[in-house]
Image: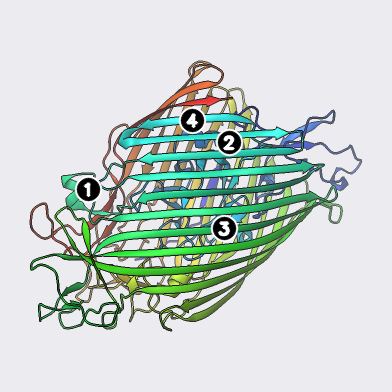
Amino acid sequence: MRVRGLVIVSISTGIVIASDAVAAQDEQTNVQNLPPVEVAAPAPSARPITSARPVARAGAPGSAALRTRLYVYPTSPGTGRGLDVDKVPSSINAVDAGQIRRTNSPNIADALQQYVPGVSINEVTGNPFQPDIQFRGYVASPLAGTPQGLAVYQNGVRINEAFSDIVNWDLIPTAAIRSAVVVTNNPAYGLNALGGAIDLQMKNGFNYQGAEIDIMGGSFGRIQGSAQWGKQVDGNWSVYGALEGIHDNGFRNFSSSDVRRFYGDVGYRFEGNEFHLNGGVANNSLAGPSTVPAELLQQYWGATYTTPQTISNKVAYLNLTGKVEATPTWTFEGTARLRRFKQGTVDGNPTDTLPCDDPTLLCFDDDDVPAFGLNGVQLANTFAPGAILSQIDRTSTKSTSFGISGQATNTDQLFGHGNRFVVGASYDLSKTHFTGSTELGTIGTNYVVTGSGIFLGQSGEPTSIGPVSLRTVNQYQGLYALDTFDVTDRFAITGGGRFNAAQISLMDQLGTALNGDHAFYRFNPIVGGTFRITPEVTAYAGYSEANRVPTPLELGCADPARPCIIGQFLVADPPLQQVVSKTVEAGFRGTKELIIGSLGWKVGAYRATNYDDIVATPIPGLTGFGFFQNVGRTRRQGLEAEVSLKSNVLAFQASYAFLDARFLDALTLGSDSPFADADGNIQVLPGNQIPRLPRHLIKASVEYAVTDVWKVGGDALFVSSQFFLGDESNQFPQLPSYTVFNLHTSYQVTKNVQLYGRVNNIFDHRYSTLGTFFDREALPNFTNGAEFTDPRSLSPARPRAFYAGMRVTF
């Protein structure tokens, strides 16, 4: 297949950074949709370009001096001053607290999908609290074993988990999020920022003041409540806290989840200096029913395949941040953080354990290869004749992470021109203990696996499925510098880069097979520029590079001769190359004040090429087994466009995103695809499209104030067809496209009491967000007593759902 070349354009409205909130009300944001910074105008000067750059102070009190609103955008992990949006050489994407609230969702992913072009989500795990967020063909996923391509930051702290770089969205209290920004084309955000970074800024008592209680309930047993409170004390101190609790039965069998999470912040500031101590805890029990054979979904949309499928997530973290404005042009900031994360999974699966030629004994994968117990002795077959054997895989991940970072920002003029220089460094240390075990059992006609108390030891030739106990140490260091120079009042250029160093040590606790030490180094440059064509239209262009290093999970499962259960067990650690991405993007954006409101728009294009990309490769004939490997070059390129209109009575936004994602090198992959050859392999040719990535996304949302107290609105999402996972050769028919419509309304009963409601998927459209293949011979189809004939395994989306709630502010 011919490889197509394309450069992608993105269009967006402006982003606003908001001043102090008033009595638990939304900040007035725009451009698009950052909170605004109040800026004192500089003193008159005969040479305006030589005057000192004005000092921006978020939430600074009013004064007699002329003030204006400046919208700035984060260009580095530090939480200090951002860069004027007119000078950012990349696409601008942001979601504010009002948009997050409008979705009435306990998950930030829904707001990102609705309001950021190029973002789509799917539920590989089958759980609404743990979605995969995809942006420009890169993923931030909670599923171990998914190659991660997005860095995620919370208040300037990277929260990709240490062992596998996963992102557990369920641990973040949605009510406490002030804004979510998607940063592109910027290596300052360190590892994993191949496709960009998601920067979450949380609320504190300086920017949120008042109290709010929000209670909602609805379909599928959903009950959720949140409470938040913020206060500024004596002008210098602030306090903020948010507590959320959610129960959801789910629309599928065995899919009940409970979420409990808290976030708090204590702040102190004086004369432009600001310090915060913030932290959070969460204790969540989640069902993860995952994909299900299409034939079972045809019988019942809430079907599951194998059970149990559960996840337990616990976290506790504490961050200390400080910002000091040493002079009118020098700002210093630093962060120290401590994080403790614990995850346990229970996963019922088919098994390759079977009776031997001698039916009194058990074998693995073949009827003459012994299956051993933990003591190294071949297992006796104690199961009833005719029993269908299965297994329960359990894992435990315990990580402790510590990090420090510092950043300095200078706005002194350079050669008589405006200039902004940022330099920063970070150090992160993480220690993880990972364990895994497999218990044999039997499976019933409801696909529930019942354990037997018999655990598998090292078994298989050459496959090894036995228990795992591994300790890992990650050390990540980064040093970055960025400079934005105003060539003229309208033309600004940006240059800089980041040096990343990573050392990963693996220490096998049961032997030596997993032992290994790995080091990775990389300098990633950035160069770009912006030109303000008119006061309302800006052009931008930029080039950058980024890298991600193999995770301990990937390094521990990289041998095709000794595969492992992907995301569960580790067996060997041959070297993997780090992934390097090279990205170019360009476009136009603008804002204009109209009689009917504020108009914002953007259009842009991008192209990103990955070198030594990493994918998870299945092993033919072994259910659930695979390994990680470098697959050469891949490319993601596309177009993004957006327009929005915001006024006192109307909020409208629409966007379109096109994504072309392809393999650039030929390779051979294992697959359960019906088009696999006799050895279970498919041949991927240059130009084949990367699976699971829709080429077209169309989004629209509108909210209209019918009266001063009553608002109605709706949103729509179109996602085009996509290739199935496992169909990298693009031979199987694609997963169908889908369109979803949602409605919402709110009524302000009094100044402090609001009633609201929402209907999701109003036409009750039955669609799937992801498709893959499964081993049709692993288990029978108990609904008809025969073998499965359809190779598809799908992730079903929620049917129509009704929700209603009440929000009380104080």
Q: Secondary structure at mark 2?
A: strand
Q: Secondary structure at mark 1?
A: loop
- Of tags 2 and 1, the one toward the viewer is 1
Name the residue carrying label 1.
Answer: 303
Quickly name the residue at label 2: 600
Residue 542 seen in this snapshot: yes
Q: How is the image coloured?
A: rainbow
Q: Position of residue 640 (x, y in %)?
A: 49, 47
Which residue sits at x=24%, y=82%?
377
Say if 592 sits above or below 796 in the image. Answer: above
First in residue order: circle 2 vs circle 4: 4
Q: Is residue 16 visible?
A: no
Mark carried by residue 214 = 4
Of helix, strand and loop, which one carries label 4? strand
Identified by mark 1, the residue type is Ala
At label 4, the amino acid type is Asp
